[in-house]
Amino acid sequence: MKGTLYLCPTPIGNLKDITMRTLEVLKSVDLIAAEDTRNTLKLLNHLEINVPMTSYYEHNKAQKGGVLIEKLNSGCSVALVSDAGMPAISDPGEDLVRLCIDAGIEVVPLPGASAFTCALVASGMPTGRFSFEGFLTTNKRNRRIHLEEVKDDTRTLIFYEAPHKLLSTLKDMLEYFGNREIVLARELTKKFEEFYRTTILDAIERYEETPPKGEFVLIIKGKDAEELEQQQRINQPTPEELIGKYAAEGLRGKELVNRIAEELKLPKREVYDLYIKMKDKV
């Protein structure tokens, strides 16, 4: 009989945030796979749990993933933990989950602490629709591509960021998002928990004067829907422009009318009437 992989969230700061169910699972499994065994050992010692551990992190996941699958296939139960919060979110745990699913191994998620949900619900930003974007890459070109892809998203945007990269990230965000509202959450659940509600430009000025400390969750207001619609109207070609463009490319009649009606979301009759008026000119 195959074992089970348990996804066990650990406290993101306050050690009291461990759940009773997670405690029971950590005590009962055969093996704990940890992102950083030294960090997890401190937690296990605090909880008085004595279960064998193995490391599973970004740079050994290719090799260690296969080892863990072998153990699970042999009937061992394994608890996966990250350094803090829910495993498999912005960490290599997602790869192990996929390996388990492909191998027909049961995956059981346990509810618990998660930094981005804590930050979101206390931010004051809209929570009905949001997009979790995780960490931006350190590669300048790829991070700019990422920001370009989400700059017109009307949902609340959520990012993780380390203190030593915060300023450069905020400056990139100012370039792509403009001076939007932002909430910077840090030291969540800890003694010096802070929610700094401001704008991107003001945040830059603050952290240029006072170097940031602690891991950050950035909650950014999505693009204003009315502003986006207006911007799209400005950038959108007119029916007359498209008739001229497509006629020059050799399109005629029904094919031309259908393409423009679909592209501009206009009634076909309206486009057809305009096309007939312009037919002799194009």
Image (spheres, helix red, strand yellow):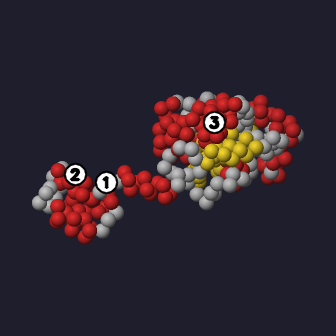
* Residue that numbered label 2 is attached to: 245
Dots 3 and 2: beta carbons under 8 Å? Answer: no
Q: In this view, does 152 lie above or below 267?
A: above
Residue 225 in the image: state x and y as whole percent: 50, 57
Dot 2 falls on a residue whose secondary structure is helix
Q: Is residue 181 above or below residue 209?
A: below
Say whether residue 211 is left or right of residue 238. right
Determine the CA span between mark 3 and mark 2.
45 Å
Residue 114 in the image: state x and y as whole percent: 71, 48
Name the residue at 63% across, 45% down.
199
Dots 2 and 1: beta carbons under 8 Å? Answer: yes
Residue 213's tag is: none
Dot 1 falls on a residue whose secondary structure is loop
Determine the CA span between mark 1 and mark 3.
37 Å
Residue 237's tag is: 1
Q: Quadrant of the C terminus?
A: bottom left
Q: In this view, does 271 lie above or below 63?
A: below
Camera-side residue: 43 or 168?
Answer: 168
Residue 37 sits in quarter: top right
Q: How crowded is mark 1: few (under 14 residues within 10 Å), some or many (20 or more)?
A: few
Q: How crowded is mark 2: few (under 14 residues within 10 Å), some or many (20 or more)?
A: some
Residue 85 in the image: state x and y as whole percent: 72, 44
* Residue that numbered label 3 is attached to: 204
Camera-side residue: 274 or 37?
Answer: 274
Residue 53 in the image: state x and y as whole percent: 76, 34
Name the residue at 37% across, 51% down.
235
What's the residue type where badge 2 is placed?
A: Lys
Name the residue at 43% across, 56% down.
230
Q: Earlier in the sequence, mark 3 or mark 2?
A: 3
Say whether residue 281 is left or right of residue 120. left
Name the residue at 72% across, 50% down.
118
